[in-house]
Image (tube, rainbow, N blue to C red):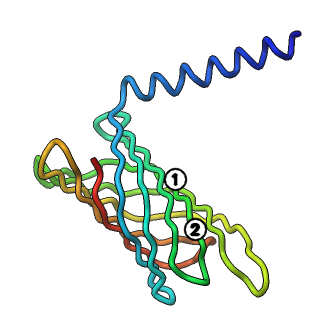
Amino acid sequence: MSHSRNMKNYIFTIVLCFSSIFCFSQINLGAGTQVIFDNTIIGFQGKGMVEWDDTWRAAGTFTFHISSAINWTVDLDAHYKLIQISDNFDLSPLAGISISSIDGVGNSTTEIGINLGAFIDFVPSDSYHIYIEPKINLGGYDSVAVSAGVLF
């Protein structure tokens, strides 16, 4: 009985935390493409971004790669809005982790890496963002990648 009550409390706490994120943050969803320059690997991605406040954002990205070397990648990054070039143009350094499914000889392994890069955000209207995101991955697929896309 006590275990059931604790589980309900945990679930309630998680739901409360996520609902506060959705109530007090701006959420953007979108799609894009990615090029990994090691062996020229191309992928298509879905991206979600949450703006915590005027200086911090969090982004999650799932990329499906069209390659025999990397199957998919999940990136979880934090952005710090460092430079506002104009009202519609921001430059934000980013850091985060990546989880990649990489094909080896006869099997697939999961690799974890660190992302370091920049998020360049152009907002031509209130309804969408255009982004370019160059980054270096260390320890995962170990290469330079550039992503670009649109967030709504």
In which quarter of the view is residue 108 placed? bottom right
Q: Nearer the viewer, mark 2 or mark 1?
A: 2
Residue hosting label 1: 76
Look at the picture and state if 152 lies above or below 35.
Answer: above
Query: Residue at 63% of width from left, 17% of height from top?
Result: 12
Q: Residue furthest right?
A: 1
In the depicted view, which residue is nearer to us: 3 or 98?
Answer: 3
Q: Residues within 10 Å of mark 2 (few under 14, many from 20)?
A: some
Look at the numbered disc 1 and give the secondary structure of its residue. strand
Amino acid type, mark 1: Leu
In which quarter of the view is residue 43 placed? bottom left
Q: Residue furthest bottom?
A: 39
- Where residue 134 appears, x then y in whole percent? 37, 70
Lateral position of residue 77 relative to residue 3, left or right: left
Query: Residue at 59% of width from left, 77% of height from top?
Result: 70
In the depicted view, which residue is nearer to us: 65 or 131?
Answer: 65
Look at the picture and state if 102 lies above or below 125.
Answer: below
In the depicted view, which residue is nearer to us: 90 or 60?
Answer: 60
- How far apart in space, not on screen, are marks 2 and 1 (Cα)? 14 Å
In which quarter of the view is residue 71 placed? bottom right
Amino acid type, mark 2: Trp
Residue hosting label 2: 72
Look at the picture and state if 74 lies above or below 8.
Answer: below
- Where residue 51 appears, x then y in whole percent? 35, 38
Look at the numbered disc 2 and give the secondary structure of its residue. strand
Locate the N terminus by quadrant. top right
Query: Residue at 38% of width from left, 35% of height from top?
Result: 52
